[in-house]
Image: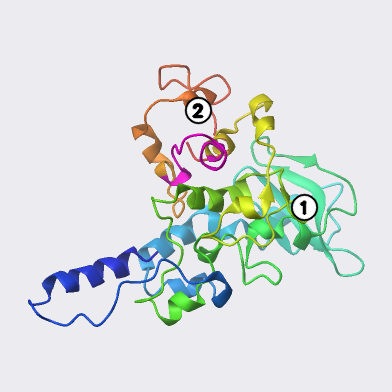
Amino acid sequence: MVVLLAVVWLGWLAAAPAGAETASPAPSAAAPASAATYVGSQRCQPCHPGVFQAWKDAPHSHTLHAPSDADRSRLAESLRCADRPVRLAIGVKRHVRFVAPDESGVDRVLPCRWNRASDSWDLVGAEPGPVFVDTCAWCHQTGAKPAKEDGVGCEACHGPGSAHVADPEHVDSFAFPASKPELAASVCGACHLQGGLSKDGLSFPDGFLPGTDLREVFEYDWGGLDSAQGDHHAQREIRTVLAGPSKRRVCLDCHDPHRQTATAHASQPQGPLCGECHVSGSAELRSGREAVCPVCEL
């Protein structure tokens, strides 16, 4: 998100006459996590309008949102959740879960789930349902406890932005440096490595901030991926960076996280991960992969 500023600064430097003073030093690598606070994605829009709009139009920005009219119509027909005062909906692509306060006012995730592929209801778990802020909120809100905004905002991946907003010429947000793939993989893994535990025993990496190493606060059973069913290419790719002997591709090599597209994956060299979706040695999709990829928009 700081590329535009960097290009402008470098262009001015190149055009400066010989002997001219260059008073502004290069930006630092990133704002110290402890010195920055969350300011909200809207503060990024004035300087990064194109990226902001791409993010705004993509699923990340509304993974948590107010129930739509269609959601409420379906809820009215649900046997388990029709009479619940639903105030939030989780997810937009494959499933939609719902959040409603219990009798004491605590937001809980309801056991009814709308399956968009089958156009039907699933029952997941039992009443009273998990406490939202202790489970889903960490990945579906930005700056959880208390949340700064709903959805996966800019700061969920780039870190708290107050220091960068206050001094964008000298302080960068985390910008996924190619020289440190483990830090890039850590950001994606913080939400996409579902099933791990924090050092405090929580199901999400409480205390993690972009620009730090996920392994410092989160533990994951990498060995279980070898026998896991279904599409786990994201988790296996993250494993090659965080737990493997070599530093292979990171998620951003194939995926545009702002637009949430994966068109760049076609230019990547073939490897073992291709076989999770494609017939070996070809671009043909395996049986069951024709309709929709459960991880991305292929």
Q: Residue at x 73, y 57 (%)?
A: 72
Q: Residue furthest front?
A: 245
Queried whether the magenta region covers residue 93, the answer comes back as no
Q: Is 143 on the left-hand or right-hand side of 125?
A: left
* Three-letter amino acid code of the residue under disc 2: Leu
Q: Secondary structure at mark 2?
A: helix
Q: Please name whichever residue, 90 or 135, is drawn nearer the observer in this view of the structure.
A: 135
Q: Nearer the viewer, residue 86 or 183?
A: 183
Question: In this figure, which residue is indicated by the disc labeled 2?
Answer: 273
Q: Is residue 161 left or right of residue 62?
A: left
Q: Position of residue 228 (x, y in %)?
A: 68, 28
What amino acid is labelled 1 in the image? Leu
Of pointers 1 and 2, the one earlier in the residue sequence = 1
Over which residues does the magenta segment extend?
238-252
Q: Is residue 148 above or below residue 133?
A: below
Kindly identify the residue that appears in the image at 54 percent across and 60 percent down: 210
Q: Residues within 10 Å of mark 2 (few under 14, many from 20)?
A: some
Q: Position of residue 113 (x, y in %)?
A: 75, 46
Label 1 element class: helix
Q: CA distance from mark 1 to mark 2?
A: 39 Å
Q: Which residue is mark 1?
A: 75
